[in-house]
Image (cartoon, rainbow, N blue to C red):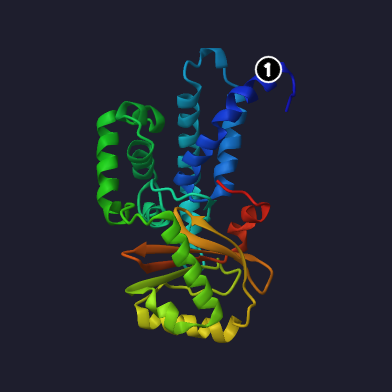
Amino acid sequence: MSDGPDSLGAAADFDPLRPRLIRVAYRMLGSMADAEDVVQDAFLRWLATDRDAVREPEAFLRRVVTRLSLDQLKSARVRRETYLGEWLPEPILEAEPVEDVTLPLLIALERLSPLERAAFLLHDVFGLDFDEVAQSIDRDPAACRQLAARARTHVQSDRPRYTVEKSRGLELAAAFFQASRGGDMEQLQAILAQDVSSHADGGGKRPAGYLPIFGIDNVMKLQRSLVRLYGGGQSELVSYGFVNGLPGFVTREADGILQTTALLIVDGRVHAIYVMRNPDKLGHLGEGRVH
């Protein structure tokens, strides 16, 4: 790639928009690695564009990123059909809670068609009007309205509804970590909802259940077995924070690989536990990056 004035000028316009473009691509794809590849591809296309003819660079680049993400989703859906165990989106660690797209909603978006996903995200999450959505996904506004409405119906139960105050969320995350790693099963059970579920993604690379576990009795049985297998302080806390909008923590496990745990909290109790163990989805956390 040339480092001449033209290239430097293109980068000067593009780089301030990069975080927002990655945000769009990540919410489309559920993978930070794929999102960064898409945004880099968009930059290469930006270099080759007659930029003087582009009146609104951000809108133009958002359209490019959306269309590249739609192409990427087609191959991603094929890969996920053969994925070993439960698929969870790549975890993003944030210093503050976000409420637009939390982990349960990201999982629910997997049930949508690529076009439904794009229309829903662009309109309901990023606030674009349907004329802008239509330009991004190459459909007319009426069709985009229908796509977003269908998507909304499919994911309604998984929309962010359960807001927990930041300090309380981190307090419960700390209580969960200390009880689960310290073997205090009575304390752990006290913070779990009766209908709690547990989800783990090992991607076939590390031990993890292939199916989610439902109900407090079954989840407690799992937690007791984990204490027997991995107890004794082998899990090192790296940091507390918000994992895809949910309170949680990052740990370094006995095998030296990072792991994230995110907790969906409703009415002061843990209603769902999401554990990411797949090392292919955790490499970016080792770089100390917070998005």
Count neighbours of disc 1 (C-alpha within 10 A) and say few if under 14, some if 14 to 19, many if 20 or more. Answer: few
> Horizontal placement of 101 versus 157: left or right?
right
Query: Which of 173/210 is in front?
Result: 173
> Horizontal placement of 256 versus 57: left or right?
right
* Quadrant in the picture for the N terminus: top right
Number of dots carrying numbers: 1
The relative height of residue 19 versus residue 215 in the rendered view (above or below) is above
> Horizontal placement of 147 versus 254: left or right?
left
| Residue 176 place in picture, x, y as percent | 47, 71
Q: Can residue 87 be spotted in the picture?
A: no
Please give the name of the residue rendered at 45% of the width and 50% of the height, measured from the top-left corner: 97
| Residue 51 place in picture, x, y as percent | 56, 17
> Horizontal placement of 245 versus 205: left or right?
left
| Residue 123 place in picture, x, y as percent | 33, 36
| Residue 90 place in picture, x, y as percent | 53, 55
Please give the name of the residue rendered at 34% of the width and 43% of the height, measured from the top-left corner: 116
Please give the name of the residue rendered at 54% of the width and 83% of the height, measured from the top-left corner: 227
Q: Can residue 232 be spotted in the picture?
A: yes
The relative height of residue 80 versus residue 67 in the rendered view (above or below) is below
The relative height of residue 14 versus residue 271 in the rendered view (above or below) is above
Q: Amino acid at mark 1?
A: Asp
Please give the name of the residue rendered at 55% of the width and 37% of the height, measured from the top-left corner: 19
Query: Which of 87/168 is in front?
Result: 168
Q: Residue furthest right?
A: 3
Asked which secondary structure carries label 1, the reply is helix
Where residue 14 sits, quadrant-wise, is top right
Residue at the disc numbered 1: 6
